[in-house]
Image (spheres, helix red, strand yellow):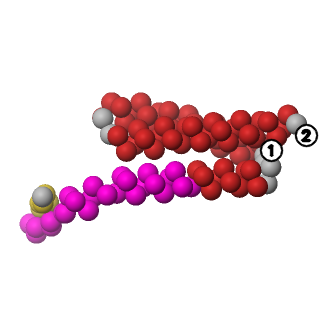
Amino acid sequence: MQNKLYLNNSLISIEMDSLDNIPIVATSISILARFIFMYLIWKNKSKNSYSLIFCILSIISSSMWIYYSVEIDNFPIIFRSSSEILLLLISSIYIIYNKLNT
């Protein structure tokens, strides 16, 4: 399937099949990044307040993305944001646990 976009009287073709892969790849990279963040927190036994603030702000941001993606019915964003919230909650709990036990 091809969509055609006209720009300055010249024809540009966009392959929709290649665009369909972008949400899947972006979601995978985002979730992988969260696992790396969690590993670094665990490895360093982090109790850093900045990491906790980052987690909280990211949870708020992801919650907003979930609301938006439900409204536009976009499953890749819903999945990414839901996964991110879960992983960030785990990270936040671990950081708070480390803060309380030192």
Of the residues shown, which amino acid type is indicated by label 1?
Lys
Of the residues shown, which amino acid type is indicated by label 2?
Thr
- Residue 49 percent coordinates (x, y): 77, 42
Q: Is residue 95 left or right of residue 69?
A: right
Magenta-colored span:
7-33
Q: Is residue 11 left or right of residue 23?
A: left
Residue 7 in view (yes/no): no
Q: Main secondary structure of the magenta part?
A: helix
Relative to 46, residue 60 above or below: above
Q: Let me know if residue 24 is in the magenta part.
A: yes
* Disc marking residue 47: 1
Name the residue located 78 percent from the left edge and 48 percent from the top edge.
46
- Residue 31 percent coordinates (x, y): 52, 51
Total marks in image: 2
Name the residue located 22 percent from the left edge and 59 percent from the top edge.
17
Which residue is identified by label 2?
102
Name the residue located 41 percent from the left edge and 38 percent from the top edge.
78
Determine the secondary structure under disc 2.
loop
- Say which quarter of the image contains residue 89: top right
Q: Of label 1 and label 2, which has the lower sequence position?
A: 1
Q: Are marks 1 and 2 in contact (CB under 8 Å)?
A: yes
